[in-house]
Every structure is written in C-alpha cells, then in structure tokens.
Image (cartoon, rainbow, N blue to C red):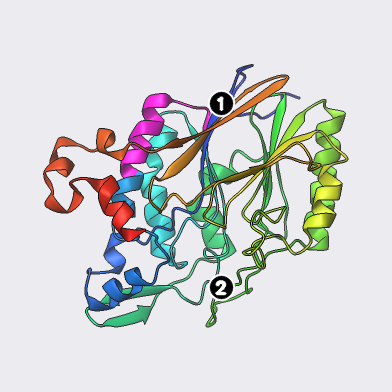
Amino acid sequence: MLMKAITDSERPDFWLISDPHLIADDLHDFGARFKKMRQTSAGKDIAYQDLALRAFVRKVVRANPAALIINGDLTFNGAKRSAERLGEIFAPLKEAGIALLVIPGNHDIYDGWARSFSGSEERRVAQISPADWKEIFSASYDLAASQEPGSLSYSVNLNPHWRLLLLDSNLYSSQFSYTHPMTSGGTDDGERRWLSQELGEAKRLGQDVLFFIHHNLYSHNSVVHDGFKLNNAGEIVQLLSQYPVRCAFSGHIHAQHIMSGWVPVPEVVSSCFAESDQGYGVVELTANSLSYRRHDFDIDNFLTAEEKKLPAFCGFSRLSEGSF
C-alpha cells in the first residue's frame, strides 16, 4: 500500500510559527473594553493580527514550502469565531498546494475566557470544542496517517522518510468552560500508548521523526517554567529518546530558545508570532540532515498598496514594538 505523504520530495521544507493569538476583528469594535484588554495582553498585538497573518500567508505562498505548521495558541481567548477566521485567512495555502498543520494550545479548546468586546462591555461567546477544532481545521486532519482518538493528536508523513508527530498536550474541560484556561499541560495513558505505537511504526519503516507540542520538554528559563514545561516531560523525553526523534518543536513561553547537544532530544522553542518581530522558522530536510533558521517577518514588504495607505497600519513593525 502506498504511504500517505504530503510530498515525495527528497528535500522537503516547512515553515513554523507559534502562538499567533488571533482574535477575529468582528469580535471587537476597538472600544474601551477591548483597549483595556489589549493593555493587559502581555505584549501581544491583538489589534492587527488579522492583517499580519494575511500578509504572512502571502509570503508563505510565494516561498511555497511543503507545509506550514502552527504550534498552538492559534486564538487569543478561545473564541470559535477566531478559529474560523484563522482558517479563512490560511485558506490560500490549500489552493497553493501547501499543507497547513495545526495543534491547539492552552488558549484554544473550551477556554472560559472566550469573549467579544463592544464599547465598555464584554460578552461570552461560543467556545471551541474538540469537534469544532477538527471541523474548522479538517484539512490538517485529512492529511493524518494516524489520529489518537482521545485527543487532538495526530501524525503526518511529510515524505516517505520523515514522520511528524503532533501531540495535543493541553488540559481542558470536556464541555463549555466558565474558568480560565489551564497553563500547564500533560499527556494521559491513551496519548502515551499512541505515541509509543507511532514511534515504533516510524522505526519499523526506517523513518526519522519530528515532534511538535505546545508545551516545552525542558525548562528554558530558570525563573519562568512552572506551567510551561510539560507536567510529565521526563517521561515523554525518555520515550522519545528511545527512537529516531531528531528534534522537538514547541512554543508557549513566547521566547525563542534552542536546547541541543547535552539533552536527549534537541528542542526548538518558537517565539510568539503576535509579538514584536513576528518570528517564524524555516526547516529544511534531507534523508540525513536537518537545518533550522529563525527569521523576522518583514511584514511591510507583504502589505498591499491599499493596506499601506491606511494610517493605522503605516510602519507596522514599529506599531508592534509599541505593543510589546
């Protein structure tokens, strides 16, 4: 049976971002309550992410990688409409033959903070259920070689040599939530069994593995790590280290950092795309090599002529730095 894979290229590449934290424009009116929320958003630019992501999609389409991977926290506060809007923004990738692969972050599924903002008021809005997630991002799950039935974890063959394991590490309610999202993350027995089976299958087929997760496998900051490092990270790292896992990719802490050399599995943590410089990663692969480079998004080069005329969007990078 032919292997289901994104590409048959022997030198595939993909792009990677994390934590775009989109809030759909139609969920706010830029009024007093939204502005107050923006001031407490820890440096995230939540006002113009729609524009930034549309411009970024143009850059991705021009570069034409095999895939774009978003490593969690696609939405700002878990509003279903924001996830739908992100799916709309990234629709041109499918038309261009570029795979979009997503995993949720701790702000995405059944987030009790899901709100719309109007004037001085805020209102609860529809949250994202696991079923909603799979429906909105069905193009991602349609590419899956395997799905873990109890979570939003899945695997994808990038090409016959490279298998991508995308693990849902988030702790969320099984129904509409009235509480804040859990910062910490972990895996249950079902996910660990599935992960072990996937790793064994990859080894049997002679595949190398790349591992994607929202939470971190290691403490990348001596001060800030509680809730950011996976609760059972040691167990997962031990499992991964028994198989040909060449690199792990995570997000969550909103800071770029790489651990390699002295750790069992190298880990690249991507910065927050919603913060100043809007970093993204480019990964290039061969059968025996992996190259990772981080870039700043040069958004001004990918705005349309009409967008550049809008006073609010002139000098977008400087505006984003002001938010930060």
In terms of depth relative to the viewer, which is nearer, 232 or 82? 232
The main secondary structure of the magenta stretch is: helix
Give the secondary structure at mark 1.
Answer: strand
Which mark, residue 13? Answer: 1
| Residue type indicated by callout 1 | Asp
Real-space Cα separation, disc 2 to disc 1, in angstroms: 33 Å
Q: Is residue 190 left or right of residue 224?
A: right
Q: Which residue lies furthest to the top in this view?
A: 10
In terms of depth relative to the viewer, which is nearer, 270 or 50? 270
Above or below for 121 versus 108: below
Above or below for 290 versus 218: above
In terms of depth relative to the viewer, which is nearer, 292 or 112? 292
Ranked by sequence position, the earlier of labels 2 and 1 is: 1
Above or below for 160 versus 135: above
In terms of depth relative to the viewer, which is nearer, 76 or 135? 76
Q: Is residue 182 inside the magenta stretch? A: no
Which mark, residue 181? Answer: 2
Q: Is residue 65 inside the magenta stretch? A: yes
Q: Is residue 60 left or right of residue 154?
A: left
- Report x, y in % for residue 39: 33, 70
The residue lying at 52 percent from left, 83 percent from top is 178
- Report x, y in % for residue 324: 37, 58
For residue 130, what is the image quadrant? bottom right
- Report x, y in % for residue 122: 33, 80
Q: What stretch is highlighted in magenta?
A: 54-67
